Amino acid sequence: MFIRTLPLVLIFLLTACSNTDQSTPKESTDKPRVALVMKSLANEFFKTMEDSAQVYASENSDNFSLITNGIKNEEDVSGQITLVEQMIAQEVDAIVIAPAFLRASYFPPR
């Protein structure tokens, strides 16, 4: 379980800590919006992940808001990319991703 969640935590921390936006900063009263983009919600593991994230978000609703998404088929890489692009277009503050097909999302160093 730890090995599976470690990449998610690292992606979240790297995304949450980076600030590439050089425009006017958001109002300090705005709560950060976190997007959770998962593999197939038909898979019980990812459905449980979504449910747990929703419970945590509701217990910490003063600190952030959560948007959850998932694809229908675990191998639908393009569908997951579309979801991530939608979250970027919505300008969420952090994106947590459980990659649909890990090799498709890995770019080896040159």
Image (spheres, grey):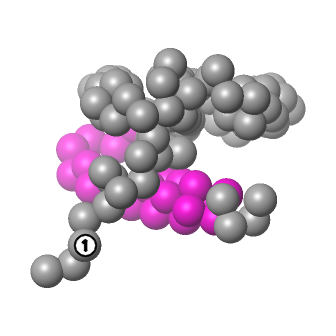
Q: Which residues are magenta?
A: 5-31
Question: Would you say residue 57 is visible in this rendering?
Answer: no
Quadrant into which the C terminus falls: bottom left
The residue located at (68%, 67%) in the rendering is 3
Snapshot quadrant of residue 34: top right
Q: Residue furthest left?
A: 110
| Magenta span contains residue 19 | yes
The residue carrying pointer 1 sits among few (fewer than 14), some (14 to 19) or many (20 or more) residues within 10 Å by Cα, namely: few
94 left or right, relative to 4: left
Measuring from the top left, give residue 44's x and y in whole percent: 75, 29
Secondary structure of the residue carrying tag 1 is loop
Measuring from the top left, give residue 7's x and y in whole percent: 56, 62
Snapshot quadrant of residue 2: bottom right
Amino acid carrying mark 1 in the image:
Pro
108 left or right, relative to 56: left
Q: Does residue 70 sit above or below 88 in this rendering?
A: above
For disc 1, the marked residue is 108
| Magenta span contains residue 37 | no
